[in-house]
Image (spheres, helix red, strand yellow):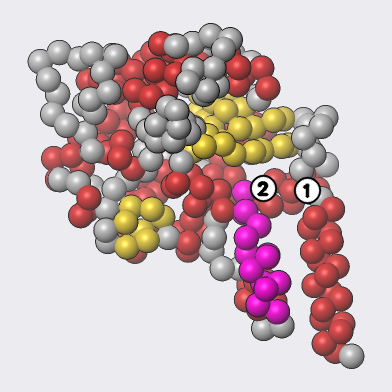
Amino acid sequence: MKTKLINFTIILFLFTLNSCKQNEEGSDMKIIFLHHSTGGVIWNGNKTSTLSWFVGKISYRLSKKIEKNPRMPALFNNYNKKHKKNYYIKEMDFPKATPYGWENNPYDYYNIWVKNAGEEPFMKEPTLEMLTKEYQLVIFKHCFPVCNIQEDLDSADINSDLKTISNYKLQYSALRDKMHEFPDTKFILFTGAAQVKSRLTEAEAKRAREFFSWVRDEWDQAGDNIYLWDLYSLETEGSLYFKDEYAVSPSDSHPNKDFAGNIVNLLFNRIIDVIDNNGNNTQVTGKEN
């Protein structure tokens, strides 16, 4: 009898969870999260939950079903139910591996959104003209190869995919001007995902820190429609490198499940604060002021 009661409670919980899923139709705010693999790990927020652990004692298959539910949409489901909102968030690989190629560095956003702007997709990727017609908040990020920054050449080239600070700055300035063309849309940009020590040189790591400090301290402008989420600071905690204890391994710069399970809540806090309060109640890491 006790086992049946526990199983019924679990089934009831799952039914409740599914019944409060986001509703795209008639949503109060439509949000798109553009990312690659690091973003996917954070979206899933795969820290093992207490519920999953408990359910696993009864049914391993059922626990895996719960664990596979991405954390970010679940946070929105709970928020919508509690606050009587209908915020809708979805994810998208951007750019896709084909035909554009699996690169999301400053050059690539500049190439798709600025250099090849317009009402038609570029190499099957949506431009800002297209995205802003459907979404009121656009979230985007770079994966950790963005940190492999090389020495500057004699002159900067906005149309170059060479990873240098001077090129990045030109591309970021053009991207900021472009986003300002859509004042009714809000944007959240991650500072770059960091690299573990074994995957870049000390000089590259110093240049990465210099660039993302510039993004936070100079590029970002108060009072506009662009907001930051400082993933770089969360991953490095003031050091030059992604901390090994937060990474999958000392040779793999993806976040591990426990770290992702923690920071997905900070990203969620930042998103909600940007929507509801223009980002005034949280720091750029998503921690409350």
Q: Percent x, y for residue 56?
A: 65, 78
Q: Quadrant of the N terminus?
A: bottom right
In depth, the one of 87 and 41 nearer the eye is 41
Image spot of residue 84 (x, y percent): 83, 42
- Residue 283 image position (x, y, % from top left): 49, 39
Where is mark 1, residue-wise?
Answer: 21
Left-right relation of 176 to 29:
left
- Taking the spot 78% from the left edge, 32% from the top edge, the residue there is 27
| Marking on residue 73 | 2
Say which element carries label 1: loop
User: Residue drawn 70% across and 46% down?
Assistant: 76
Helix, strand or loop under label 2: helix
Magenta residues, as a range?
59-73
Which picture quadrant has residue 204?
A: top left
Q: Is residue 66 visible?
A: yes
Question: Marks 2/1: CA distance?
Answer: 8 Å
Give the dominant element type of the magenta stretch: helix, strand or loop. Answer: helix
Above or below: residue 241 compared with residue 248 = above
Q: Earlier along the polypeptide chain: callout 2 or callout 1? A: 1
Disc 1: CA contacts within 10 A as few (<14), some (14-19) or many (>=20): some
